[in-house]
Amino acid sequence: QVQLVESGGGLVQPGGSLRLSCAASGSIFSINAMGWYRQAPGKQRELVARITSGGSTNYADSVKGRFTISRDNAKNTVSLQMNSLKPEDTAVYYCNLDELRVGGRRYWGQGTQVTVSS
Protein backbone atom coordinates (compact mmCIF):
# COMPACT_ATOMS: atom_id res chain seq x y z
CA GLN A 1 0.00 0.00 0.00
CA VAL A 2 1.10 3.55 -0.75
CA GLN A 3 0.17 6.70 1.12
CA LEU A 4 0.31 10.17 -0.43
CA VAL A 5 0.31 13.29 1.72
CA GLU A 6 -0.08 16.71 0.09
CA SER A 7 0.75 20.14 1.41
CA GLY A 8 0.93 23.71 0.19
CA GLY A 9 -2.56 24.68 -0.89
CA GLY A 10 -4.23 27.92 0.08
CA LEU A 11 -5.63 31.24 -1.03
CA VAL A 12 -3.68 33.40 -3.46
CA GLN A 13 -4.45 36.46 -5.55
CA PRO A 14 -4.54 36.29 -9.35
CA GLY A 15 -1.02 36.46 -10.71
CA GLY A 16 0.42 34.97 -7.57
CA SER A 17 2.30 31.74 -6.96
CA LEU A 18 1.90 28.61 -4.87
CA ARG A 19 3.94 25.46 -4.49
CA LEU A 20 2.30 22.10 -3.83
CA SER A 21 4.25 19.18 -2.45
CA CYS A 22 3.41 15.51 -2.08
CA ALA A 23 5.28 12.82 -0.19
CA ALA A 24 4.76 9.14 -0.93
CA SER A 25 5.40 6.38 1.58
CA GLY A 26 4.86 2.66 1.82
CA SER A 27 5.54 -0.07 -0.76
CA ILE A 28 6.41 2.08 -3.76
CA PHE A 29 7.12 0.41 -7.09
CA SER A 30 10.18 2.20 -8.39
CA ILE A 31 8.98 2.61 -11.97
CA ASN A 32 6.10 4.99 -11.60
CA ALA A 33 4.56 8.27 -12.57
CA MET A 34 3.61 10.89 -10.05
CA GLY A 35 1.42 13.80 -10.84
CA TRP A 36 -1.23 16.30 -9.96
CA TYR A 37 -4.87 16.29 -10.95
CA ARG A 38 -7.47 18.86 -10.07
CA GLN A 39 -11.22 18.99 -9.74
CA ALA A 40 -13.27 22.16 -9.73
CA PRO A 41 -16.88 22.20 -8.48
CA GLY A 42 -19.19 20.65 -11.05
CA LYS A 43 -16.33 19.50 -13.26
CA GLN A 44 -14.51 16.25 -13.85
CA ARG A 45 -11.10 15.58 -12.40
CA GLU A 46 -8.42 16.50 -14.92
CA LEU A 47 -4.71 15.98 -15.30
CA VAL A 48 -2.60 19.03 -14.50
CA ALA A 49 0.93 17.66 -14.79
CA ARG A 50 2.69 14.33 -14.57
CA ILE A 51 6.31 13.17 -14.30
CA THR A 52 7.69 9.67 -14.57
CA SER A 53 10.48 8.19 -12.49
CA GLY A 54 12.59 8.57 -15.64
CA GLY A 55 11.90 12.29 -15.76
CA SER A 56 9.44 12.53 -18.65
CA THR A 57 6.81 15.18 -18.13
CA ASN A 58 3.49 16.19 -19.59
CA TYR A 59 1.24 19.12 -18.83
CA ALA A 60 -2.30 20.19 -19.50
CA ASP A 61 -2.36 22.85 -22.22
CA SER A 62 -4.00 25.26 -19.79
CA VAL A 63 -0.98 25.29 -17.47
CA LYS A 64 1.93 25.05 -19.89
CA GLY A 65 4.43 27.83 -19.30
CA ARG A 66 2.97 28.62 -15.88
CA PHE A 67 3.31 25.40 -13.88
CA THR A 68 6.41 23.25 -13.39
CA ILE A 69 6.43 19.74 -11.99
CA SER A 70 9.49 18.18 -10.40
CA ARG A 71 10.31 15.13 -8.30
CA ASP A 72 12.95 13.68 -6.03
CA ASN A 73 13.14 9.94 -6.61
CA ALA A 74 15.32 9.37 -3.55
CA LYS A 75 12.74 11.02 -1.28
CA ASN A 76 9.64 9.88 -3.21
CA THR A 77 8.33 13.41 -3.42
CA VAL A 78 6.74 15.43 -6.20
CA SER A 79 6.20 19.17 -6.31
CA LEU A 80 4.18 21.52 -8.46
CA GLN A 81 5.30 25.12 -8.77
CA MET A 82 2.35 27.20 -9.89
CA ASN A 83 3.00 30.71 -11.18
CA SER A 84 0.78 33.33 -12.77
CA LEU A 85 -2.24 31.76 -11.15
CA LYS A 86 -5.67 32.49 -12.56
CA PRO A 87 -9.13 32.24 -10.98
CA GLU A 88 -9.83 29.27 -13.26
CA ASP A 89 -7.02 27.39 -11.51
CA THR A 90 -9.22 27.23 -8.42
CA ALA A 91 -9.84 23.58 -7.57
CA VAL A 92 -8.99 20.77 -5.23
CA TYR A 93 -5.60 19.42 -6.28
CA TYR A 94 -4.89 15.74 -5.85
CA CYS A 95 -1.52 14.04 -5.81
CA ASN A 96 -1.40 10.81 -7.78
CA LEU A 97 0.96 7.88 -8.18
CA ASP A 98 0.62 5.28 -10.94
CA GLU A 99 2.69 2.10 -10.93
CA LEU A 100 4.01 1.63 -14.46
CA ARG A 101 3.69 -2.12 -14.77
CA VAL A 102 1.07 -4.60 -15.89
CA GLY A 103 -1.67 -4.54 -13.32
CA GLY A 104 -0.11 -1.55 -11.63
CA ARG A 105 -2.16 0.28 -9.06
CA ARG A 106 -3.19 3.92 -8.86
CA TYR A 107 -3.04 5.87 -5.63
CA TRP A 108 -4.49 9.24 -4.62
CA GLY A 109 -3.82 11.78 -1.93
CA GLN A 110 -6.59 13.36 0.09
CA GLY A 111 -6.52 16.60 -1.90
CA THR A 112 -5.59 20.17 -1.09
CA GLN A 113 -7.65 23.26 -1.90
CA VAL A 114 -6.20 25.97 -4.12
CA THR A 115 -8.25 29.15 -4.38
CA VAL A 116 -7.25 32.00 -6.68
CA SER A 117 -9.25 35.08 -5.85
CA SER A 118 -8.85 38.78 -5.19
Image (cartoon, rainbow, N blue to C red):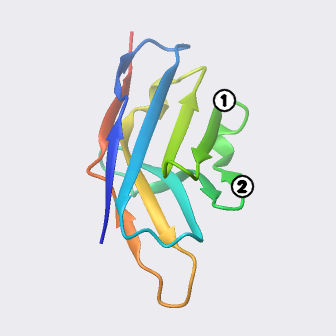
Nearest to N terminus: mark 1 or mark 2: 2
| Proximity of marks 1 and 2: CB atoms separated by less than 8 Å | no
Quadrant where the C terminus is found in the figure: top left
Per the image, label 1 sits on a secondary structure element best described as loop
Residue that sits furthest to the front in the current view = 74
Q: Residue at x 46, y 63 (%)?
A: 97
Query: On residue 117, which mark appears?
Result: none
Q: Is residue 35 above or below residue 117?
A: below
Going by the numbered disc 2, the residue's amino acid type is Gly
List the residue tagged with mark 2: 55
Query: On residue 66, which mark appears?
Result: 1
Q: Which residue is drawn at 48% across and 46% down?
A: 77
Q: Is residue 80 above or below residue 15?
A: below
Per the image, label 2 sits on a secondary structure element best described as loop
Decide: few, some or many residues near mark 1? Use Cα within 10 Å; few <14, some 14-19, many ≥20: few
- Provide residue 113's location: percent of width, then percent of height: 30, 34
- Provide residue 95's location: percent of width, then percent of height: 41, 51
